[in-house]
Image (cartoon, rainbow, N blue to C red):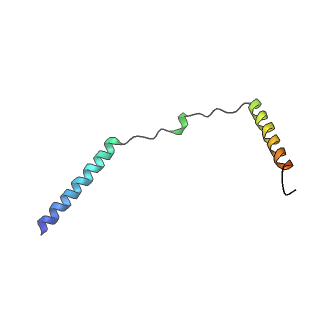
């Protein structure tokens, strides 16, 4: 009876060690976000965006059904 438990424990330990080693072999590092730069909008784009936003809000206020 003790020998059966010893064999089962050794087999579980071997599976655990093999899974840890396998994980270490196939693991990939996540790239950092600092390498990717998002372009900042220029002043002209900001003004255009502001004008479009204002026109959209004016349209919403004019078409407001609850008055």
Quick one: quadrant of the N terminus?
bottom left
Q: In the image shown, does 25 or 52 lie closer to the viewer? A: 52
What residue occupies the far bottom of the structure in this picture?
1
Q: Is residue 5 above or below residue 18?
A: below
Residue 22 horizontal/vertical position (percent): 29, 45
Residue 6, quarter of the rendered image: bottom left
Instruction: Say left or right for 32 vs 41.
Output: left
Q: Residue at x 59, y 33 (%)?
A: 37
Q: Residue at x 84, y 49 (%)?
A: 63
Instruction: Say left or right for 14 vs 41.
Output: left
Residue 62 horizontal/vertical position (percent): 86, 48
Residue 45, quarter of the rendered image: top right
Quick one: quadrant of the C terminus?
bottom right
Q: Is residue 58 above or below residue 67?
A: above
Instruction: Say left or right for 44 vs 67.
Output: left
Residue 17 horizontal/vertical position (percent): 25, 51
Q: Residue at x 24, y 53 (%)?
A: 15
Exactly how many numbered labels are in the figure? 0
Q: In the image shown, does 34 or 65 lie closer to the viewer? A: 65
Q: Residue at x 13, y 65 (%)?
A: 4
Instruction: Say left or right for 45 vs 39.
Output: right
Residue 5, quarter of the rendered image: bottom left
Residue 38 horizontal/vertical position (percent): 61, 34
């Amino acid at each position: 009876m003790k020998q059966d438990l010893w064999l089962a424990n050794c087999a579980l330990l071997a599976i655990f060690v093999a899974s840890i080693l396998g994980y270490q072999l196939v693991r990939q590092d996540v790239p950092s976000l600092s390498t990717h730069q998002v372009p900042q909008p220029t002043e002209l784009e900001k003004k255009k965006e502001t004008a479009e936003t204002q026109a959209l809000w004016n349209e919403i206020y004019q078409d407001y059904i609850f008055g």
